[in-house]
Amino acid sequence: MFLENTVNHKEQFGWIEVICGSMFSGKTEELIRRLKRAQFAKQKVEIFKPAIDIRYDDEMVVSHDANEIRSTPVPAAANIRILADTCDVVGIDEAQFFDDEIVSVCNDLANKGIRVIVAGLDMDFKGNPFGPMPALMATAEYVTKVHAVCTRTGNLAQFSYRKSSKDDLVLLGETEEYEPLSRAAYYKATLKEKVREIEVKDPKEVSKNSNTQNE
């Protein structure tokens, strides 16, 4: 569990906090909570998000529960380094969509005494580590993994299952495109997909395998 760190004013270094998990797990909700606490404490806070993320609003960072906080959309990680130089706290949402430079940007800001809070998907829809997130998690002082609830089993979910057949790595969407699944549900869903692909390519092969299993 993450416990918010107290500031040691003799130590002129900041730190990195990473909030990760699947879609619908509350990552952005937790990011907004921490940032609003910092704003309430009258700290200078700046929030950034990828310019491509316009699902809810062009400028606001918005959670699935409709909580929001004003942000600055940027096309690349390098922009954050320039715009956040005089902040006390920097928030970054949807970090998986940034280029790999986001890792050095976060470390540079932390080394200047800034508290950096990053939220993002740790895995893509194929279940692979997503973009710069593994490196951010490795270099962060604090990592919080949050979970959604599996729509099929009711267990904890850590996979973002894509319901459509689109194969683009970056595909912004909500419940019409994705659902959170547990390991067991994700495995069964992807297994069914493979069977359907084989059926389309070679129906005889599927029939032969089925007969073999029944013998």
Image (spheres, rainbow, N blue to C red):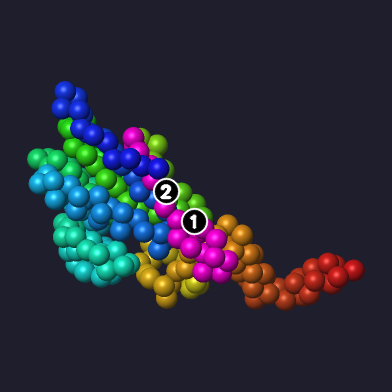
Image position, residue 48 (x, y; %):
20, 53
Q: Which residue lies furthest to the right in this view?
A: 215
Specify start and end residues of the magenta stretch as a single range: 140-158
Characterize the local packing of mark 1: few (<14), some (14-19) or many (20 or more) Cα atoms within 10 angstroms. many
Image position, residue 180 (x, y; %):
48, 64
Give the number of the disc on residue 172. none
**Quadrant the C terminus occupies:** bottom right
Q: What element carries label 2?
A: strand
Q: Distance between the residues labelled 1 and 2?
A: 9 Å
- Say if residue 126 shows up in the picture: no
The residue singled out by tag 2 in the image is 145
Image position, residue 188 (x, y; %):
63, 64
- Say if residue 148 shows up in the picture: yes
Q: In which quarter of the image is residue 102?
A: top left
Q: In this view, does 100 lie above or below 203?
A: above
Q: In which quarter of the image is residue 214?
A: bottom right
In-front residue for pair 176/208: 176
- Which residue is depicted at the point 38% across and 66% down? 171
In-front residue for pair 128/152: 152
Q: Is residue 69 magenta?
A: no
Q: What residue type is labelled 2?
A: Lys
- Which residue is depicted at the point 22% across and 39% down? 115
- Which residue is depicted at the point 50% across and 72% down? 163
Q: In which quarter of the image is residue 100?
A: top left
The residue singled out by tag 1 in the image is 158
Image position, residue 117 (x, y; %):
27, 45
For the residues labelled 1 and 2, say whether their Cβ atoms are less than 8 Å apart. yes
